[in-house]
Image (spheres, rainbow, N blue to C red):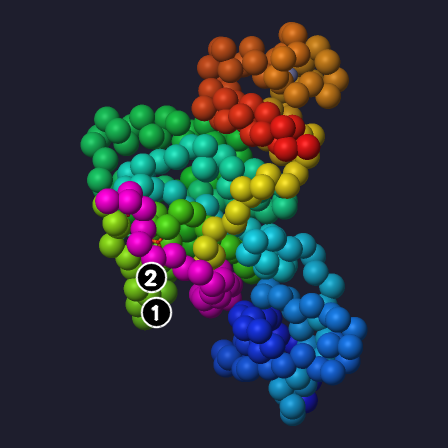
Amino acid sequence: MIKTAVVIRALSSFFYVSIDNQIIECRASKKLKQNKQKIIVGDDVEVDLDFNYIIAVKKRTNYLQRPLIANVQNCILVTSAIEPKLNLGLLDRMILIMEINKLDIIIIITKIDLLSIAELSSLKKTMSYYQKVGYTVIYSPYDDFQDQLNLNLTSDKYVITGQSGVGKSTIINYLIPNLDLQTQEISRVLGRGKHTTREVTFYSYKNIYLIDTPGFSSLDLDFKDNQLRDNYPDFVEYSPGCKYKGCFHDQEPNCQIKKLVEDQEILATRYNYYIKMLHQVRGLK
Ligand SMILES: Nc1nc2c(ncn2[C@@H]2O[C@H](COP(=O)(O)OP(=O)(O)O)[C@@H](O)[C@H]2O)c(=O)[nH]1
Ligand SMILES: [Mg+2]
Ligand SMILES: [Zn+2]
């Protein structure tokens, strides 16, 4: 019998696929091996259940690199308000990677219970900027946290990513209570989590997959300066107001983006971090 399934785990030459709520260990068929067809997690495959062979890999709609995951359209970027302290540069970098890969973005800010009222209100003011850009922002833990998340989880696969210790496993536990994932104590000395999820892990939740990841690296910034510029939707929207077509909003005169930063219409942290990355990207070439 031949069935279609999603690869949820890849371990050297073994692939684990999910079929009818069962996880089945498979190998690649000889033909796939001969064709040097790569199989990665997230792939939609055809499985011959008589031999537990993967016999075909369907065309990927997209894939993310490091970690390699195929066919994802959505992501949940998790960042904590505190412990570890909110890092807007890191958030912008995660947003950028997802924008370049054309994923829809949900941002979850955790640990707001540890903030004072004043801190929370200042955080919300900052985050309202991101909402204005078009990202969904959800705060945790609030009583209606799960309802809000459910409302926003509509498609089939969500990669969850964020620094270690921000509360990714805690969120997955909220959503899938019988899973009982181990959460980690924060190592206060290092200011970051002790343990990291090293592997990409798929969790089935209702009719969707939540995919826990160790975070997407972009340390080598392997994109071009124009890709950087074109994946800030807030800059793209206003760049027709720049004097120069193709303005990078750096040294160019009469730049609308720089003006909007001065007028506090564009978040200065976001602009400053953009410039830093722009210079890095150009320096590397
Ligand atoms: N106070 C508070 N602690 C949280 C919250 N979310 C997670 N934590 C704690 O932060 C630590 C790290 O959480 P964990 O889910 O393991 O983070 P992960 O590394 O991103 O998976 C654990 O001790 C959690 O109990 C939250 O919203 N509020
Ligand atoms: Mg975890
Ligand atoms: Zn400009």
| Image location of residue 114, percent across then percent down | 22, 40
Q: Which residues are magenta?
A: 189-211
Instruction: Give the mark nearer the N terminus: 1 vs 2.
Output: 2
Category of crowding for the residue at label 1, using alpha-carbon neighbours closer than 10 angstroms: few (below 14), some (14–19), many (at least 20)? few
Instruction: Please give the name of the residue rendered at 20% of the width and 32% of the height, measured from the top-left corner.
Output: 116
Left or right of 121 in this view: 20: right
Instruction: Please give the name of the residue rendered at 45% of the width and 55% of the height, measured from the top-left corner.
Output: 214
Q: Say which amino acid is labelled 2.
A: Asn
**Corner quadrant of residue 115:** top left
Could you say whether the residue bearing mark 1 is in a helix, strand or loop? helix
| Residue reaching furthest to the front | 284
| Mark 2 residue's CB less than 8 Å from ligand 1 | yes
Instruction: Please give the name of the residue rendered at 34% of the width and 57% of the height, measured from the top-left corner.
Output: 195
> Is 24 covered by the magenta stretch?
no
**On-image quarter of the N terminus:** bottom right
**On-image quarter of the C terminus:** top right
